[in-house]
């Protein structure tokens, strides 16, 4: 049985399923769960391209690619730098929510500028964790550039993660334009 599981992991790539499911649940699943009990009139995650496509598909995909990159480069990961990436993740998440408030982009997570609902408060912590994780992956890649370039799987994972994040950024810009300009 153990041999069959190990063979399936190598052949089918089942090692990708756990990070994909965890990422989807952490980025989109909790918002979907919140939406079941939401009865307000503010736009929810389902009104945003960056919410449905980004949180639902693109960012989980980037996370799987980042996980693949980290698996390939695990011997060269400098874990002592983790507090730096967590701090940078916090600063980035905080700046993003302040930008949202400054733009007046209100929705169900921020019904009024600088006032966050329960889903908005959860979103802050999810965003913090997400950005910190991607800082780790991208910093490992940048700090080990030649190792990254010589590893076909790591290199393709790196490029695919950036492509996914680029599409997410495009979706986010579209949403900002749609929802902040009457």
Image (spheres, rainbow, N blue to C red):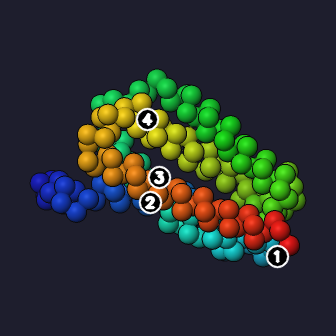
Lateral position of residue 136 relative to residue 42, left or right: left
For label 4, the crowd category at 10 Å Cα-Cα, with few meaning under 14, some 14 to 19 and many 20 or more, is: few
For label 3, the crowd category at 10 Å Cα-Cα, with few meaning under 14, some 14 to 19 and many 20 or more, is: some
Which is nearer the N-term, disc 2 or disc 1? 1
Which is nearer the N-term, disc 1 or disc 3? 1
For label 1, the crowd category at 10 Å Cα-Cα, with few meaning under 14, some 14 to 19 and many 20 or more, is: few
Q: Which residue lies under the disc numbered 2?
A: 61
Select label 1 or label 3 by which is in front. 3
Q: Which residue lies under the disc numbered 4?
A: 142
Lateral position of residue 7 relative to residue 132, left or right: left
Instruction: Judge whether residue 20 can be spotted in this image.
Output: yes
Secondary structure at numbered mark 2: helix
Q: State the CA–CA distance, disc 2 to disc 3.
A: 10 Å
Q: Which residue lies under the disc numbered 1?
A: 41
Q: State the CA–CA distance, disc 2 to disc 1.
A: 30 Å
Question: Residue 123, percent across and down?
Answer: 67, 54
Select label 4 or label 2 by which is in front. 4
Which is nearer the N-term, disc 2 or disc 3? 2
- Give the vertical position of 48 relative to 14 (above or below): below
């Amino acid at each position: 049985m153990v041999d069959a599981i190990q063979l399936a992991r190598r052949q089918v790539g089942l090692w990708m399923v756990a990070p994909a499911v965890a990422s989807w649940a952490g980025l989109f699943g909790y918002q979907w769960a919140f939406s079941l009990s939401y009865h307000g009139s503010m736009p929810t995650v389902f009104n945003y391209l960056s919410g449905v496509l980004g949180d639902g598909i693109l960012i989980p995909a980037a996370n799987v690619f980042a996980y693949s990159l980290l698996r390939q480069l695990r011997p060269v990961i400098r874990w002592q730098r983790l507090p730096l990436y967590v701090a940078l993740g916090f600063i980035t998440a905080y700046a993003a929510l302040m930008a949202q408030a400054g733009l007046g982009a209100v929705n169900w997570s921020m019904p009024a500028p600088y006032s966050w609902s329960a889903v908005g408060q959860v979103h802050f912590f999810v965003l913090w964790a997400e950005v910190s994780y991607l800082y780790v992956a991208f910093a490992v890649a940048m700090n080990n550039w030649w190792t990254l370039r010589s590893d076909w799987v790591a290199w393709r994972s790196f490029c695919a993660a950036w492509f996914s994040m680029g599409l997410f950024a495009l979706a986010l810009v579209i949403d900002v334009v749609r929802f902040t300009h009457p």
